[in-house]
Image (tube, rainbow, N blue to C red):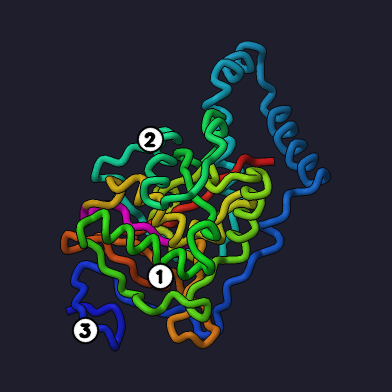
Amino acid sequence: MIYLSSNDTRPLSNFRGWVSGPSSFKLKVNKMITEKMTSNQRKQIVRFVEDGIDAMNLQKDGAQRLIENGGEFQAELKKLVERFSITNQYADEEVESSYGYLSGYKPNSKSMTEQTNRLRELFPGIGYANEKLAEQVLPGNAEGWFAIPRWEKVAPTYGEAVQKVLDLIKQTRNGAFYNYREGELGSNQLRQSAKTVSIFQKLGDEQKDQDILVVPAQFGIRHRGRSVRRAREVMNANECGLGAFAIGIMLLTHPERLNHYDDLWIDCAGDEFAPHADGGFSGSPYFGFAGGEVGFARVVGGASGRCGSASVCLPQG
């Protein structure tokens, strides 16, 4: 029998247990990741590409074929850049994963109007969004446009806002929900990561006077098989993990995302969790599905092929 923690007697044969990371582990915002590259760095990278092309001595016909396949060439070049630019920290915390969106969730299948209308049903009195933003081309790595209210419009504190969202998930699923972190959502145990706070501040500044933000994001598949800290490590300057509030909102507007045990479970990499309320924010929450119900629990330290971190993916540059 598997239990969530030593003082939790609710059996979880289908849910992950808690495995702590190193006791000294403190999550930081890595300055080299969050800062944009300099103009000199860009020039040097471009020179590498130009030198590589020159060394190949491409003929006119070959160059034309490359131009005609420009989209595919760019996609492959992007993979190459990511391969050589991603840090190796926590590289051993990745496993193969075949889990995905089993229950019928389709990326970008719901209009912004449909999402915002649903949110106004769930949160009476909440305002509007600049829905025209969702007509833009999706940034790379994002799979859809999501309507996410400012949490400050829902409750006075982040933890209270998360609790309201969890209560609504339980209500809209006719009770098929269990909160394994009941009573543990205070500021001494749950907080947003600094990078997530910064990116949502940027979104909020750009979408002034809107209660609901239009957010380009992905629902976990980009980082499936990676631990939370490995997912954070490989996120570029314009990407950050989503927290329990945002992911909970996305589950309210897209309930079909998590309806089966074999759906990809969702790590809340935008949140930090202190299991002992002692200042050691060494974990993160996650949403899973087992026994016919959604569960909200705290994340393990290692990688699991069953899980992936959801994230905001802003445009590059």
Point out the frontmost of discs 1 and 3: 3
- The Cα–Cα distance between marks 3 and 2, rounded to whole angstroms, is 39 Å
Label annotation for residue 302: 1
- Helix or strand or loop: what does disc 1 sit on? loop
User: Is 153 rendered above or below residue 43?
Assistant: below
Q: Residue 267: within the magenta?
A: yes
Q: Which residues are magenta?
A: 260-269
**Which is nearer the N-term, disc 1 or disc 3?**
3
The N terminus, quarter of image? bottom left
Foreground: 76 or 27?
A: 27
- Amino acid found under the numbered disc labelled 3: Thr
Q: Label 3, on which residue?
A: 9
Main secondary structure along the magenta-highlighted residues: loop
Q: Circles 3 and 2: CB distance less than 8 Å?
A: no
Residue drawn at x 53%, y 49% is: 312
Q: Where is residue 30? Give x, y as percent.
A: 66, 64
